[in-house]
Image: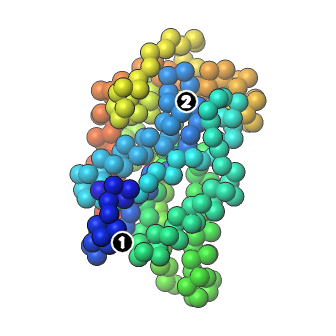
């Protein structure tokens, strides 16, 4: 069940049964020569939507821009500054709590978002607690948030390692590209890559990133990506999301 494809009476009826919602959150940033700019937003969206369809979980709109400053030397990347992202997440959470939601499960697709998401949670707990007039340190939190990176879902890493024992790497991985190809087979790209496996190294600013990693990949060979691999990864991820979301909704 997707919020943007539902009517307000349908969401009102859902709230009578559950106070929990899943929000996919990611980034719009370069993902190498054959990875889509939307990869980090599409992965949690594809997994979240399937979990929603299978288990009747309400899935909100995708928060699809994140922390991508270090990818800005590659065309098409869009980034928030951290303060903008925190403010926007706070407004989403306040809107949802206004309607009665008390549990927000943020399914994340971008490692670079983690610190900012965590800071946004602190801001939410502070702001929402104060707006309810309960003061800092109140025992009752009307809102509880949870962050889960999709690649850390139970069982997912095992599937990825089996599929891609060599060339998984750190950015523009064959696993994440496979998930997007499964979701959007018509968007697959065939690109020759040199070297076959991209170099590894540290990340500093955007210009330095492009010097070290000229085609955008870090340590990966995403030419191995396939629809079939994506299907296996999504299947494992959906199973884990459903179980974890149910647990969280009842917490
Ligand atoms: Ni990514």
Assess mark 1: CB under 8 A from ligand 1?
no
The answer to whether residue 202 is left or right of residue 37 is: right
Packing grade of label 2 (10 A; few <14, some 14-19, many >=20) is: many
Q: Is residue 42 above or below residue 55?
A: above
Q: Is residue 178 above or below residue 113?
A: above
Residue 28, position as x, y percentages in the image: 56, 40
Q: Residue at x 73, y 34 (%)?
A: 206
Residue 229, position as x, y percentages in the image: 33, 28
Q: Secondary structure at mark 2?
A: loop
Assess mark 2: CB under 8 A from ligand 1?
yes
Residue that label 2 marks: 31
Labelled disc at residue 70: none
First in residue order: circle 2 vs circle 1 = 1
Foreground residue among 227 and 79 = 79
Q: Residue at x 73, y 23 (%)?
A: 211
Residue 142, position as x, y percentages in the image: 47, 79
Quadrant of the image containing the N terminus:
bottom left
Verify CB contact (< 8 Å) between mark 2 and mark 1. Answer: no
Foreground residue among 82 and 168 = 82
Packing grade of label 1 (10 A; few <14, some 14-19, many >=20) is: some
Quadrant of the image containing the C terminus:
bottom left
Residue that label 1 marks: 19
Q: Secondary structure at mark 1?
A: loop
Q: For residue 6, which quarter of the picture?
A: bottom left
Q: For residue 111, which quarter of the picture?
A: top right
Q: Residue at x 44, y 34 (%)?
A: 176
Foreground residue among 37 and 240 = 37
Q: Residue at x 26, y 51 (%)?
A: 53
């Amino acid at each position: 069940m997707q919020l943007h494809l539902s009517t307000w009476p349908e969401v009102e009826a859902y709230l009578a049964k559950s106070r929990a919602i899943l929000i996919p959150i990611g980034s719009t940033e370069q993902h190498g020569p054959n990875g889509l700019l939307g990869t980090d937003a599409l992965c949690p969206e594809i997994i979240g939507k399937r979990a929603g369809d299978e288990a009747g979980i309400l899935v909100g709109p995708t928060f699809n821009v994140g922390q991508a400053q270090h990818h800005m030397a590659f065309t098409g990347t869009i980034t928030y500054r951290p303060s903008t992202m925190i403010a926007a997440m706070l407004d989403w959470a306040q809107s949802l709590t206004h309607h009665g939601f008390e549990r927000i499960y943020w399914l994340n697709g971008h490692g670079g978002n983690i610190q900012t998401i965590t800071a946004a949670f602190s801001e939410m707990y502070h702001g929402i607690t104060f707006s309810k007039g309960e003061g800092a340190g109140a025992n009752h939190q009307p809102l509880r948030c949870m962050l889960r990176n999709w690649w850390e879902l139970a069982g997912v890493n095992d599937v990825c390692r089996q599929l891609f024992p060599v060339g998984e790497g750190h950015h523009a991985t064959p696993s994440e590209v496979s998930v997007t190809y499964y979701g959007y087979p018509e968007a697959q790209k065939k690109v020759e890559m040199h070297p076959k496996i991209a170099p590894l190294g540290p990340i500093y600013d955007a210009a330095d990133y492009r010097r070290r990693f000229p085609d955008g990949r870090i340590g990966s060979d995403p030419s191995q990506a396939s629809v079939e691999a994506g299907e296996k990864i999504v299947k494992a991820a959906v199973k884990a999301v459903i179980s974890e979301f149910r647990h969280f909704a009842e917490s």
